[in-house]
Amino acid sequence: MEAPLTDIGKWPVLEALSKKLRVILDISHVSLGVVGSLTLKWSITRVLSHLHGDHAGGLKDLVTEAPHVPIYVSREHWEAFGKHPFYAGIQGCTPQHWPQDFAPNILEYSDHAVGPWKQSYNITSDQRVVAVDTPGHVPGHISLVVYGDNDDGTRTVYFLTGDATYGLDLLETEEPDGINDDPEMALQSLELIKEFARQTDLVVLPSHDVDTPRLLRERVAYKQNTQQAPATQVSSAMG
């Protein structure tokens, strides 16, 4: 599977994701040492859920180590923050840590439906890794859907939330985070994630939940109002 590297921010999902999925959610300056050069060698794409400092603070270092690897953001997010670095700084970004002349690639929509999302962004050509819109926390926020193969031949679907939700408890109660651009839209994004989880067994991996490594390691499917259980094979989720 092609190996996208997504987000440059918080530590909880780092090591587990790199070993399990070859997809890393959130890498900051603090955690770059955990990621190491191996990650940079096999990563072919970097995808940012958004440009807040705890998700993009290590961009400059990553570009220095692997300048050939493209970086992607959504068009809406780049229009809102990327083109306006002063405003972005007020909103929690750290443009002083962006690479010089930072100009990431813009993700383009495809008509490939993913769960309740009628459109998505293809990250890999085989559509094993796709991004979907989860705005609200910031304009143009995106989350990642990964179709991962298990050692026993089954497949598990992972949902890397970015900051669409900070934890499964907040997802369950449909509570948007306290710092967001559009609370109503943030709630709609939570509802879409929960609808996706009703349609298929889904391992939801929030960026800021300290339990995320365990959820990944045990492939714990998010179950609403029920005890969570290991995810089962999903054979039809990719169409």
Image (cartoon, rainbow, N blue to C red):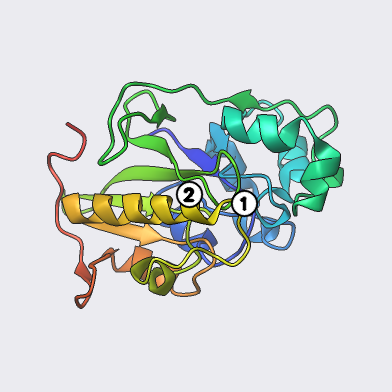
Q: Is residue 238 left or right of residue 76?
A: left
User: Mark 2 belongs to which amino acid?
Assistant: Met
The 10 Å Cα crowd at callout 1, few under 14, some 14 to 19, many 20 or more, is: some
Residue located beneath label 1 in the image: 181
Look at the numbered disc 1 and give the secondary structure of its residue: loop
Q: Quadrant of the N terminus?
A: top left
Q: Is residue 194 left or right of residue 133?
A: left
Closer-to-camera residue (177/14): 177
Residue 185, numbered circle? 2
**Where residue 229 appears, x then y in whole percent?**
19, 71
Q: Are marks 1 and 2 in contact (CB under 8 Å)?
A: yes
Q: Quadrant of the C terminus?
A: top left
Q: Quadrant of residue 59?
A: top right
Note whether residue 115 is visible: yes
User: Mark 1 belongs to which amino acid?
Assistant: Asp
**Above or below 163: residue 101:** above
**Where residue 28 appears, x then y in whole percent?**
69, 56
Closer-to-camera residue (98/17): 98
Q: Is residue 86 left or right of residue 34?
A: right
Look at the numbered disc 2 and give the secondary structure of its residue: helix
